[in-house]
Image (cartoon, rainbow, N blue to C red):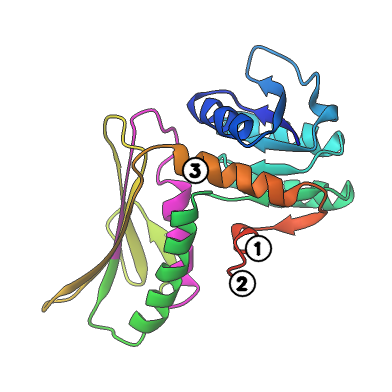
Amino acid sequence: MKIALLGYGKMGKVIERIALERGHEIVLKKDEFNSYDGLSTADVAIDFSVPTAAVANISNAFNANVPVVSGTTGWLEHLDEMVALCNEKQSGFISSSNFSLGVNIFFELNEYLAKIMSQFDSYKVTMEEIHHTQKLDAPSGTAISLAKGVIENSNYANWTLEEAKGNEIHIEAKRIGDVPGTHTVTYDSIVDNIELKHTAHNREGFALGAVIAAEWLAGKKGIYSMKDVLNLK
């Protein structure tokens, strides 16, 4: 399979290595200094760039009839536009806040736990996410996905980085050293607490999941999620 890498930072380089190990070919390594030459020859594009570049990267891929796997976060106010463009161009699209196989299992556990805990008003949910100091957006896309998972399965209505009021979920975002990503969901009461936690040891899991998603998406049309890739629906 021919892969275009849209974004060639630390994650892009790990994705490149894993893709090559799995027998794929890299036809473009797009960063801020080069063009999209070679994009149209790709079977699929993997976008791990920055929020300011994501829309241009994804748009160029769809216009070149190349499906996209996007793991960039912090740009999702434009997601509906990209979904519409994907449908218009009859391409394929997977956008996820986190491609780690473990995190996507964590998402499922989070939703299941939220359904159970919605029956018990004595517990208050909070979240914490820790990432490396180079991460530009806060809270992380993964933390937002976790919050949405709780909101969709409980009486909570919103999340906030500030002190929670009413039916809001407080998310504490920390930036420390070179931490790949730690996410914790805590249900706290006066008698005990229940904690659900995922700790990434390195970037390998994110990169492997993105390549697996690209392998799955190649040749498909439509809007999908990691639930489809991992058969979790």
The span from disc 2 to disc 1 (Cα, nearest Å) is 7 Å
Q: CA distance from mark 3 to mark 1?
A: 17 Å
Give the image quarter of residue 45.
Answer: top right
**Residue 233: image tag:** 2
Q: Is residue 203 visible?
A: yes
- Residue at the disc numbered 3: 206
Q: Residue 36 shows which numbered tag? A: none
Magenta-tinted stretch: 126-155
Q: Residue furthest left?
A: 191
Depth check: give the residue in front, 120 or 40: 40
Is residue 157 visible in this depiction of the protein? no
* Outermost residue toward the bottom in this view: 119
Count neighbours of disc 3 (C-alpha within 10 A) and say few if under 14, some if 14 to 19, many if 20 or more: many
Give me the disc on residue 228. Answer: 1
> Which three-letter amino acid code belongs to the residue tagged 1?
Asp
Q: Going by the image, does 140 lie left or right of 166?
A: right
Q: Residue furthest top?
A: 33
Identify the residue at image location x=66%, y=36%.
Answer: 46
